[in-house]
Image: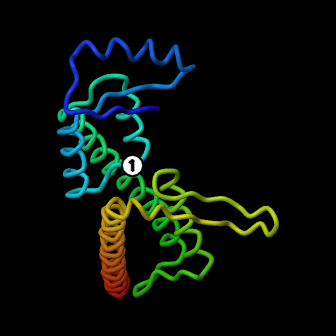
């Protein structure tokens, strides 16, 4: 991948991209006008949500990159963040309900360390490969977790979505337990009347 920056480019320069790729054995070339580069940097500073794979697509497009291309890239990044957050929320909800169904009572959802580790592992696993890289050390068999810190703004959005979901789940569980208690009281009253 090779990007040329210049004040601007004539439209017909794009026809040389394919020829360049053939001459260089597959290296792609893109043309990035300086005003577009400044626009990209400015937008990224305001909202650092672009991932390397999104930028790679932009820089290997084999054409002149314009501001509207940058805007589309940020729109795609926002969509991906929403999708990733929703996927993580769904996974949290699934695992939480599974645990709560076995361990909830009138006051608590009881979890031991193993259940909590399982819940965290499942959510982190959902975030692969976008925000997390997980693997096992061959010598110890211990799971390693590498967090992609450059994506701190994406982490902020995903984690806030997970916190909101967790609070929502606790509220729902509380309401369910309250209804169960009310149902028990009504059953006792009914049975005492007979």
The 10 Å Cα crowd at callout 1, few under 14, some 14 to 19, many 20 or more, is some
For the point 25% across and 12% down, which residue is it?
Answer: 12
Q: Nearer the viewer, residue 59 or 160?
A: 59
Quarter placement of the C terminus: bottom left
Q: Nearer the viewer, residue 170 or 77?
A: 77
For the point 68% across and 66% down, which residue is it?
Answer: 143
Q: In the rendering, at what x and y percent does residue 77 appear?
A: 31, 45
Residue at numbered disc 1 = 51
For the point 23% across and 56% down, which residue is it?
Answer: 47
Residue at the right extreme of this rendering: 139
Q: In the rendering, at what x and y percent does residue 189 appear?
A: 31, 85
Task: Look at the image and name its color scheme.
Answer: rainbow
Q: In the rendering, at what x and y percent does residue 13 appear?
A: 29, 16
| 42 sits left or right of 190 in the view | left
* Vertical relation: 152 (above or below) 179: above
Q: In the rendering, at what x and y percent does residue 173 appear?
A: 36, 74
Residue at the front extreme of this rendering: 6
* Vertical relation: 127 (above or below) 116: above
| 40 sits left or right of 60 in the view | left
For the point 40% across and 87% down, which residue is it?
Answer: 107
């Amino acid at each position: 991948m090779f990007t040329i920056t210049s004040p601007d480019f004539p439209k017909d320069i794009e026809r040389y991209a394919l020829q360049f790729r053939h001459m260089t054995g597959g290296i792609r070339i893109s043309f990035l006008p300086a005003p577009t580069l400044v626009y990209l940097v400015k937008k990224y500073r305001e909202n650092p949500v672009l991932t390397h794979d999104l930028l790679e697509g932009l820089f290997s497009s084999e054409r002149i990159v314009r501001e509207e291309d940058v805007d589309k890239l940020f729109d795609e990044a926002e969509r991906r963040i929403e999708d990733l957050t929703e996927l993580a929320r769904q996974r949290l909800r699934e695992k939480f309900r599974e645990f709560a169904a076995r361990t909830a009572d009138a006051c608590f959802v009881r979890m031991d360390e193993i259940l909590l580790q399982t819940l965290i592992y499942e959510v982190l696993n959902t975030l692969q490969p976008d925000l997390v890289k997980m693997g096992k050390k061959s010598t110890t068999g211990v799971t390693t977790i590498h967090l992609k810190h450059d994506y701190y703004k994406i982490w902020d959005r995903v984690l806030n979505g997970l916190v909101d979901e967790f609070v929502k789940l606790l509220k729902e569980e509380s309401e369910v337990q309250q209804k169960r208690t009310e149902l028990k009281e009504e059953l006792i009253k009914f049975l005492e009347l007979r």
